[in-house]
Image: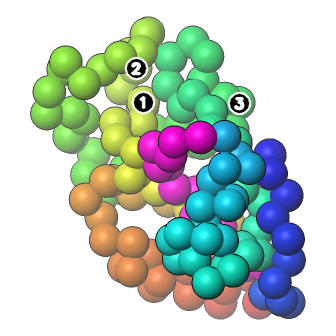
Amino acid sequence: MVKAPRSGGTEKLSHVFRLRKENGNGEEILLSLQNVRPGNGFKPDFTIMEKVEVNGENAHAVFQFLKSQLPYPSDDSTSFMKSPSSINWAPVKRNDISWNFEKFLVAPDGKPFLRYSKSFQTIEIQKDIKSLIEKFS
């Protein structure tokens, strides 16, 4: 993990884990955030995970746990991948993460709360985050 410098006192009430296909290692990703997108010296107020495998026999333990607790996206329980040629891991399981824009929302107590498909608009997660804030306040 890359420990990002703190940029303020943002209270962490929940986390959205979002998979992205980033080039480079953790340090390069952090520099990209600071200098390219969003840029302007941006310093995340959270720990950035290193690139890891999320599917197959080398899947990272965090994603094994998330997938075991939330086996498919709450907004789309039937779709997986449109093109089987996109599958480049083994073994393939139904609870695998089908695309890098799937998202996980984890409650403050560490329990996975919801999993969202690649097509679920990230802005729409706001209502679920608010419900967790209310529940844990």
Q: Is residue 108 magenta?
A: no
Q: Which residue is mark 3?
A: 61
Q: Main SS type for the magenta part?
A: loop
Against 4, residue 25 (above or below) is above
- 9 or 96: which is nearer to us? 9
**Residue 111 place in picture, x, y as percent:** 69, 56
State yes or no: discs 1 and 2 in contact (Cβ < 8 Å): yes
The disc labelled 3 sits on which kind of residue? Ala
**Residue behind mark 1:** 96
Residue type, numbered disc 2: Lys
Q: Residue at x 66, y 29 (%)?
A: 60
Reading the image, the residue beneath label 2 is: 93
Gap in angstroms between the C-alphas marked 3 and 2: 15 Å
Label 1, label 3: how many angstroms apart (C-alpha)? 13 Å
Q: Nearer the viewer, residue 27 or 17?
A: 27
- Furthest residue in direction left, as rendered: 82
How packed mark 3 is, by other alpha carbons closer than 10 Å (few <14, some 14-19, many 20 or more), is few
> Residue 131: x percent and y percent?
56, 84
**In what element is the residue under mark 2?**
loop
- Magenta residues? 11-24
